[in-house]
Amino acid sequence: MKSLEVSFKNPFFKKASSSQPYTTANPFRVMVHKEIADNIRSWRFTVLLALIVLTFFGSMYVSLSNIATAVANVKDPGHLFLYLKLLTTTDGTLPPFHVFLNFLGPLLGIGLGFDAINSEQNSGTLIRLMAQPVYRDNLLLSKFISALIIVSTLFFSLVLLMIGGGLLITGVRIDPEEILRIFSFTALSIAYVAFWLSLSILLSVKFKQAATSALTAIGIWLFFTIFYQMIVNMIAKALLPNPAFISPGQTIYYNNIVLNVLRLAPGRLYTDAVTTLLMPSVRSLGPLTMEQMAGAIPSPLPFKESLMIVWPQVSGLVAATVVCFAWSYYLFMRREIRN
């Protein structure tokens, strides 16, 4: 009877009714709830949340201060999209909110996942957790899903707050296309953070020390943010011919090669995609010839065409996230947890 009473205290068992006193709870749901609660109570999430919220309100203040000038610019094909201007307008004092997310999004993903597995093993809770009726894949998936739920709730809350604040301050009705573009931007931002989250979880499985996985993840982020473009430009300048001695067609060909290499960086994929979604006047992400521009009317693109332009960038971010998570799954399933 003692062993039975001990098992009743297990979090994976819950009381159902008097006729059936205890039944097994869904282990995955229990772990997701626990991870969400632990992340919300942690100081690192509080600090990252404060940074993102402060930058959001700072960007919104600058946008609202200059929204009249931006909307009055009739030369801009997208000047009528008021709520898109709230996310892109700036006077130079602060960058737009999507530029801040390009910088802070990786920190949020790394902060939520760099010690997802190795901290459990170092504290000895991983062995006790695996002794419960749970699977390894449920543990790894709960770490990822719980962090993604928190990030999704945060971003959608900020976007809804921006839309509600814009309705109260300006009184202008939001267009359905603006809603599609804003929520697509939010989903893309979540996918961007999800990539860094899956990468940090991979490093937490790979390395036994949380400090090592955190420094490695930050090093990868700094490399792609600061040094990658510099290295690519230096190599391109050394290897590619001088544009003054080649035809315009060859110049465009070599520029496309450099752009494709630069798009191996996750930050570049995210920047290209959100710029196209939030600025309907953007018609291409690469150089255009005069023949391609002939007859083009300076008007905003429909949402469907903008989405088709950024679909390769979206697919690249999602594919990179899946690869990192699949790699971490493979390593974790083959890992000896008793050491």
Image: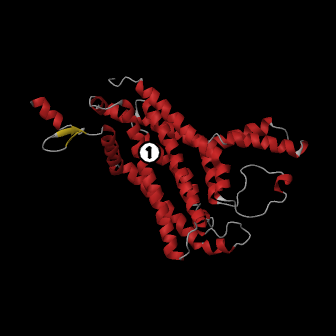
Instruction: Left or right? Give the position of 222 relative to 298.
Output: left
**Residue named by callout 1:** 111
Which residue is nearer to you in this view: 238 or 258?
Answer: 258
Q: Quadrant of residue 228?
A: top right
Give, as a three-letter code, the residue at label 1.
Gly
Residue under the image location 47 percent in, 33 percent down: 203
Instruction: Left or right? Give the position of 325 relative to 27.
Output: right
Q: Position of residue 16 (x, y in %)?
A: 19, 44
Q: Position of residue 309 (x, y in %)?
A: 68, 50
For residue 96, above or below residue 334? below
Identify the element where label 1 is drawn. Answer: helix
For residue 273, above or below residue 1? below
For residue 49, above or below residue 65? above
Q: Quadrant of residue 81?
A: bottom right
In which quadrant will I find the N terminus? Answer: top left
Instruction: Left or right? Give the position of 124 relative to 328.
Output: left
According to the image, what is the colour scheme of the structure?
Answer: secondary structure
Residue under the image location 47 percent in, 43 percent down: 110
Instruction: Examine the rendering and report whether any part of residue 115 can be seen.
Output: no
